[in-house]
Image (cartoon, rainbow, N blue to C red):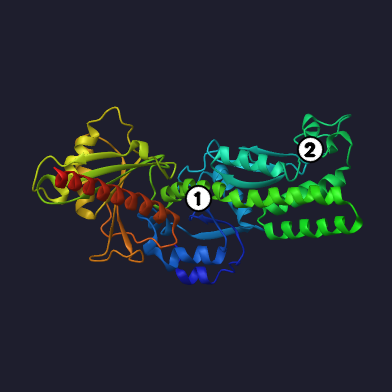
Amino acid sequence: MLILDNIKQLNLPLTSGSYQFLDAKGKIIYVGKAVNLRSRILSYWQRPGELSLLKQQMLTKICQVKWLDTDSEIEALLLEANLIKKYQPEYNISLRDDKRFIYIKISLEDELPAVFATRNLDKSGKYYGPFVSTRAVRETLRAVRKIWPYCTTRKIGSKPCFYYQVGRCLGACGGVVSPEEYLKQVIKPLMSFLDGKKNKVVADMEREMKKLVKSGDELGATRLKMRLVSLRAVLAGAQVLSVADKYANDVVELAKVLSLKKVPQRIEGYDLSTGPGRESVGVMVVFAGGEADNSQYRKFKIQAGGLGDTDMLKEVLERRLKHDDWPLPDLLIIDGGKAQLNTTLRILKKYQLDLDVLAISKGEGLRSSKAPDKIFFPGQTTALQLPLSSPALHLVKRVRDESHRFAIGFHRDLRSKKMFK
């Protein structure tokens, strides 16, 4: 078993990469990735209280640490995925299913580099991802093709492909331009764009446009200007991809951090809003793929008056679980603490359901956005406090805050109707 002093003596790099934890037999038991390997690996021993019980158990088994450097975070992601697939470490939940993630690949190994979406990883080519929204990736590829007309043909033939006829290919596939010119005009700037060097790409295009104007090539300058305008449109719309992927990846991170049974595709959040007499209400909100699905939200009027919070929660959960026509959730998130968590567990046991569940609450009297949130799990005596930057915490808070908003809105509507009556 390694301790903090052992880890500090390692010559850990500050670069991105993938790290592996090994047990006494030299078997890889966990694979992770990091933007900063030194900072990430040290954090396990410096802040063990932020780890789940399963991860804390893992620390007692680690006898060796190895790592592999990469040149970028994207490459670290890809390396992590490949190592998990290869070694199947016991402390890595099977979160990186090949059918779930999609990548953009540039096939540099081919005679003519092609650009396309793929779910398969191999040693050749250049990959960007992983992404989880197939639609967003394909729309992004269609948009960038208007700027850099890449080819999907991987060999040079006797005539250009169909896309050359519609202006979506330079014609390198048919010898219209040389492979070297194709690399210069299309592949290299596209790779820079996908690498995140957007400012450099824009600056290069503006500089080239000035050269064309100076040389008298007004037509060429106009065409480049149109491509630059299209690029600015793509940059403005890039948030669609990043937000969708962030939400879906938050779900994956949540499953990893909390050691859930599987990645929760359907999350249900519950909250109560209390008032005098029969005005107390409960609500259920639903998140699918990390995003709110308000078409599946449900409202519950508390039928019995004068109940405490746990009794009201019990009523809401039992009424919900009697609906066999509603899909069962992979995870329940309850607004509250240990009492609410234990109530939920008793209800699930009554209905013989084995579902992941957690409760989230703020410290006593603290409601500001900066107040620490405490997460309660079954079987844990102390609450888990995730750092404010944690993607997993972001998702849990989004569910909790949305259920709180929905409950308050429902309660206000009922009070307003009662006043008018």
Question: Does residue 204 lie above or below 168 as drawn?
Answer: below
Q: Nearer the viewer, residue 288 or 166?
A: 166
Disc 1 crowd, CA 10 A, few/some/many (<14, 14-19, 20+): some
Question: Does residue 136 lie above or below 211 as drawn?
Answer: above
- Find residue 169 and name its label: 2
Q: Nearer the viewer, residue 256 or 167?
A: 167
Residue 136 on image: x %, y %: 57, 41
Residue behind mark 1: 246
Q: The N terminus is located in which quarter?
A: bottom left
Residue 274 on image: x %, y %: 17, 51
Residue type at tag 2? Cys
Residue 309 on image: x %, y %: 16, 50
Please give left or right for residue 137 compared with residue 367 in the image. right
Q: Give whichever of discs 2 and 1 has the lower sequence position.
A: 2
Please give left or right for residue 59 compared with residue 239 in the image. left
**Residue at far top of view:** 325
The reply to whether residue 306 is visible in this rendering is yes
Question: Does residue 152 lie above or below 279 as drawn?
Answer: above
Query: Which numbered mark, 2 or 1, is in the foreground of this view?
Result: 2
